[in-house]
Structures are given as structure tokens and as C-alpha cells.
């Protein structure tokens, strides 16, 4: 349909914006459909009226914990269409871990993963021969002042989630009103207090990008054990020094399961005047062929397994995808109910207050369970 114009909204980072622009240029050449992309932080979903956002755009890049809120407000079109069953199955089978499932809510598929991520481990290979595999090794590095940890909300909560999952007692991610068993929560928070007491206090104001920027430049710190990976920092020449990525260290010495799943998905607005054309683009950009070629080479961090297994994609990123695959495969799915996003914000600040005040774990865990219970009300 030559001359048709769509609008898309993605997140404000080269990893979220650049591949969308590059892929849309090719899409226009192939189909005549033009897509203009705007940028907005994912956190804006918490304050910006979702319905107004959906009415302004045909295509929206979302984070999976928003699914319950957005679908309750009838803002998205389901993507599980009978006339595209072959393509749908191919995208589903190409999921890295639970990335595809994360956008399935109330038995419908509301988005396709185009970016896969979880908390992984980052380190400087020129300063550290190998990343620590066990928690005690991380603590030893932290005692030497060599560890950074992103603690700016919501990342403190993500680390708490990852610790509970890796200890084998993950937080709830269904309709259970109890977030975490008190004993399991206490154990995770005690580990968290242990490492936070050893890292630089400015970590409370740092998100993953800030930590990676510092890791890439400093010669003092060499490791961040729990951090959302950004493959571009593993590309030679992106920064002064390469930051390599690998599986998270194990708290129990057994596995690397339990990391808090991240990533983003492409969704189609229920208010789009061109739903068929928008849906066609969503299927195309989430497919393995594009994900392992133009999407990856344009600065994206693909969500399809074909890209994660591709030799050239890995060679360009210091083996980022192969090195973190086990962590992604065992990642834990966050809650997605309408009300979760408010909990995420409140819980993150509550954890930081407790860490700064050096509180005992019991009152914090009680508050987290209360906040989670209240997130289902209304």
C-alpha cells in the first residue's frame, strides 16, 4: 500500500531507537509503508495515560510487566492471528527463555519480543581474567572495592528478585497475594545488604548504563554481578575499554537460574487505523531473519534465538549472546497484573531506604508483602 504512514513509539536509547529506524527504512522500500518513530522512557508508562499513548501511535514498544495494565484498558490488539499461524509459531519457537511467554496474558499474545535481556554479569576482561562464578568470589572482589551494582530504582528490586530466584525460592509472579516467603526474603535481603555495604554509595543513583559507563572507563572497579546487559558495551571501539558479559554468579554454587527477565516487545495499538499493516511490520521485525541481520547490526539487542546463536552477531559483541544464554534461559518472569507497576516503584524505594538505614530484613519483607498484596486492590 504505497504512501501509507504509521507512527511508532519506542524507548529512549540507541538500542531501542536505532534498529527501529533502520528496519523501517527497509520496510518502506519493500512495502511503501512509512513508519516514523518517537522515543519515550519505559517508565513513562507509569505516569502517561496509556489510552492517550495508544491513540497517538500505531506501534508501541513495551516492557512485559505493563501487559496487565495496558490490556485491561483495551489499548492493544492481540497478535495471535489464525492467518499468520506459521509465522507466529516460528517467532514462538525462537524465544530466548520466557521472552515470548512474557507477552502472553489471559491466553492472548499482546506483543512479540524484539529485545531480550535479563540481569547478567558484567566485567572488564583486561582487569579480571574470569568473572566470579560464586557469591563468595563476588564478595571478595567487593571487599577490594572492585564491584559496582546499579541500585537506582527499580534496579534494587530487580537485584532482590534475582537473588530470591537464584536461591531457589523466587518471588510470586501470579495471582498469589504473597510476594515472598519471609524466610526466603530475609535470606535474599541479607545477601543484598552484605554486598551493598561494600560498594560505592553513589551506586544508589546509578542505573545499568551509568554503571557500564563507569566500568568502561575506570581501572578501580572491574565487575558488576547483577546488571541488565547492554551488548553495545561489548563491541570493540564503542567505549575506551570493552565490558564483557556472562552468566550471573551462583548464590548456592549450583545454577544461574532466577535472574529477573527484562527486554522489550513490539505491540500494535487497538486504535490504529491501519492494524493489518502495523501487524505485518510487528511480525516482520520479530522474525529470526531480520533479528539476526539488520536489527542486530543496527545496534539492537535481538530477542530471537536465531540471532543469539549467530556466529557473526556473537563475534561482534565479544560473545555476549552465547556467554549469557544460560542466564536468559533460566530467567524469572516478573508479575504482570494491573497494579504491578505501582508496586515496583514503591518496593524499589522501600528497599533502598532499608539498605541506607541498615534495617533488619524482617520489617522490610513484611512491607514488601504488604505492598504487593495491596497492588491487587482496585
Image (cartoon, rainbow, N blue to C red):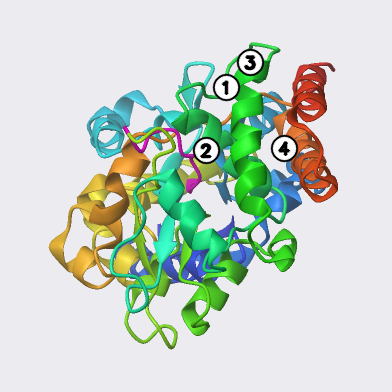
Say which residue label 4 marks. Answer: 344
Q: Residue furthest top?
A: 176
Q: Secondary structure at mark 2?
A: helix
Say which residue label 1 marks. Answer: 173
First in residue order: circle 2 vs circle 1: 2
- Dot 1 alpha-carbon crowd within 10 angstroms: few under 14, some 14 to 19, many 20 or more: some
- Dot 3 alpha-carbon crowd within 10 angstroms: few under 14, some 14 to 19, many 20 or more: some
> Disc 3 or disc 4, which is closer to the eye?
3
Q: Secondary structure at mark 4?
A: helix
Q: Secondary structure at mark 1?
A: loop
In space, the residues marked 3 and 2 are separated at their CA atoms by: 15 Å
Q: Which mark is residue 181?
A: 3
First in residue order: circle 3 vs circle 2: 2
> Disc 1 or disc 3, which is closer to the eye?
3
First in residue order: circle 1 vs circle 3: 1
First in residue order: circle 4 vs circle 1: 1
- Dot 4 alpha-carbon crowd within 10 angstroms: few under 14, some 14 to 19, many 20 or more: many
Amino acid at each position: 500500500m504505497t504512501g501509507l504512514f504509521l507512527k511508532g513509539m519506542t524507548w529512549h536509547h540507541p538500542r531501542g531507537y536505532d534498529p527501529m529506524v533502520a528496519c523501517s527504512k527497509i520496510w518502506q522500500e519493500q512495502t511503501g509503508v512509512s513508519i516514523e518513530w518517537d522515543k519515550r522512557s519505559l517508565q513513562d508508562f507509569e505516569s502517561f495515560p496509556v489510552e492517550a499513548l495508544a491513540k497517538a501511535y500505531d506501534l508501541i514498544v513495551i516492557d512485559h510487566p505493563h501487559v496487565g495494565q495496558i490490556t485491561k484498558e483495551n489499548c492493544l490488539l492481540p497478535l495471535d492471528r489464525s492467518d499468520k499461524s506459521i509465522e507466529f509459531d516460528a517467532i514462538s519457537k525462537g524465544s530466548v527463555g520466557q521472552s515470548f511467554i512474557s507477552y502472553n496474558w489471559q491466553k492472548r499474545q499482546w506483543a512479540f519480543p524484539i529485545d531480550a535481556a535479563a540481569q547478567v554479569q558484567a566485567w572488564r576482561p583486561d582487569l579480571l581474567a574470569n568473572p566470579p562464578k560464586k557469591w563468595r568470589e563476588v564478595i571478595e572482589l567487593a571487599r577490594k572495592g572492585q564491584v559496582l551494582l546499579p541500585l537506582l530504582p527499580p534496579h534494587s528490586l530487580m537485584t532482590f528478585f534475582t537473588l530470591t530466584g537464584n536461591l531457589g525460592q523466587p518471588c510470586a509472579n501470579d495471582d498469589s497475594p504473597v510476594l515472598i516467603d519471609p524466610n526466603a526474603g530475609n535470606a535474599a535481603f541479607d545477601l543484598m545488604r552484605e554486598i551493598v555495604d561494600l560498594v560505592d554509595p553513589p551506586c544508589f543513583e546509578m542505573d545499568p548504563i551509568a554503571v557500564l559507563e563507569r566500568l568502561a572507563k575506570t581501572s578501580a572497579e572491574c565487575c558488576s554481578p547483577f546488571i541488565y546487559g547492554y551488548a553495545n558495551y561489548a563491541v570493540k571501539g564503542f567505549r575506551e575499554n570493552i565490558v564483557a558479559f556472562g552468566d550471573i554468579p551462583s548464590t548456592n554454587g549450583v545454577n544461574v537460574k532466577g535472574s529477573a527477565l527484562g527486554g522489550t516487545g513490539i505491540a500494535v495499538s487497538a486504535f490504529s487505523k491501519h492494524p493489518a499493516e502495523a501487524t505485518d511490520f510487528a511480525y516482520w521485525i520479530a522474525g529470526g531473519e531480520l533479528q539476526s541481520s539488520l536489527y542486530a547490526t543496527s545496534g539492537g539487542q535481538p530477542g530471537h534465538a536465531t540471532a543469539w546463536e549467530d556466529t557473526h552477531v556473537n563475534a561482534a559483541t565479544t560473545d555476549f549472546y552465547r556467554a549469557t544464554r544460560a542466564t536468559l534461559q533460566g530467567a524469572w518472569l516478573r508479575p504482570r497484573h494491573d497494579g504491578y507497576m505501582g508496586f515496583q516503584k514503591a518496593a524499589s524505594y522501600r528497599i533502598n531506604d532499608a539498605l541506607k538505614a541498615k534495617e533488619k530484613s524482617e520489617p522490610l519483607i513484611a512491607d514488601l508483602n504488604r505492598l504487593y498484596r495491596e497492588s491487587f486492590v482496585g
